[in-house]
Amino acid sequence: MAALLSLPSFAKVNWILKILGKRSDGFHEILTLYQTVDLKDGLELQVLDQPVIQLEVNGRSPGPVRENLVLRAASLLREHVSGTKGVFIRLKKRVPMSAGLGGGSSNAAVTLMALNQLWEAGLSLSQLAELGGRLGSDVPFFLWGGSALGEGRGEIITPLPDNAERELLLVHPGMSISTSEAYGLEMWGSWTPEAVLTSRGAASKMQNFREAVENFKCSPALLENDFETPLFKKYPLLQRVRQILAEAGCEKILLCGSGSTLLAISSAEGRLRAAEAVERNDLGRVFHCRTLGRNAYRREFKRSGLKFPE
């Protein structure tokens, strides 16, 4: 029987996302703090003796299959290792796409790790991260999970200590916002490696948050996302959802990544009240989830038979 893995593919939120400016290569320099959450897709991968890569997608539509990051990740890895085997992959989608939750990036990272094992490619974690960075800026983060600092385009990862587990409410308003669209809504200025003054304020805020995380005293007042101003200006629906969540008593409301999902922090009673208000006003779909630390993240994969590369 051919080798088979059935794995989770977890989403993420960004506690902080600071945009430092546009680089000479066309990308934007950012500082961000990633956090995995237990909202997830599912991936089943079965090795084929024939040199073909097949993908079947069930659930939420992620767009054309040929453009799917899972397919691109599998093709990139096989090309890199000059492999001769193939794979059949079944992707079960639950995480909304183009929603700031990193669903596609997570799928790609899990595919790289799974096929590294199934195809016996023998790549290290850093080698997989380099390949992942070619697929998308968020992809390398999902090779680590938990809490992590992201620099550069977001692909330079520094793992941080696990913070105390936190219950969250995510609200997806049924609209998609591409990362390129979000960046295109604002003139972020230019950035060069010598632009120390440009990044000093963001770095200071990031350090405050890192210290809070390390001391398990993360305050919602530290959370912020630079995409909020342009996106809330363009999309009144996002403002409406934020208003409803605030009226329900949520302690903090934050845009996830480059949108369109909103994250709400509140008491258990407040989360239920907020979810009911969103549903009553037909403002989108709600997801009750919790943060997933690195140890728990890796434990979930190990239970499924995945061995993390060193």
Image (tube, rainbow, N blue to C red):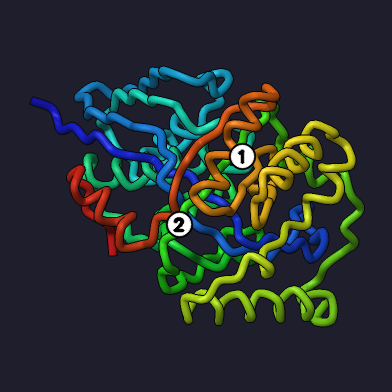
As shown in the figure, which amino acid type bears the numbered disc 1?
Ala
Front disc: 2 or 1: 1
- Residue drawn at 79 percent across, 31 percent down: 237
Whether 11 is drawn above or below 36: the answer is above
The N terminus lies in quadrant: top left
Secondary element at tag 1: helix
In front: 203, or 192?
203
Relative side of 190 to 125, left or right = right
The quarter holding residue 174 reads top right
Q: Earlier in the sequence, mark 2 or mark 1?
A: 2
Q: Is residue 7 above or below residue 267?
A: above
Horizontal side of residue 148 vs 274, given as left or right: left
- Place of residue 113 in the rendered image (x, y in percent of width and height, measured from the top left): 33, 47
Task: Residue under label 2, please give it.
Answer: 129
* Residue that appears at 44% across and 26% down: 93
Which residue is pictured at 65% across the width and 24% down the height? Answer: 280
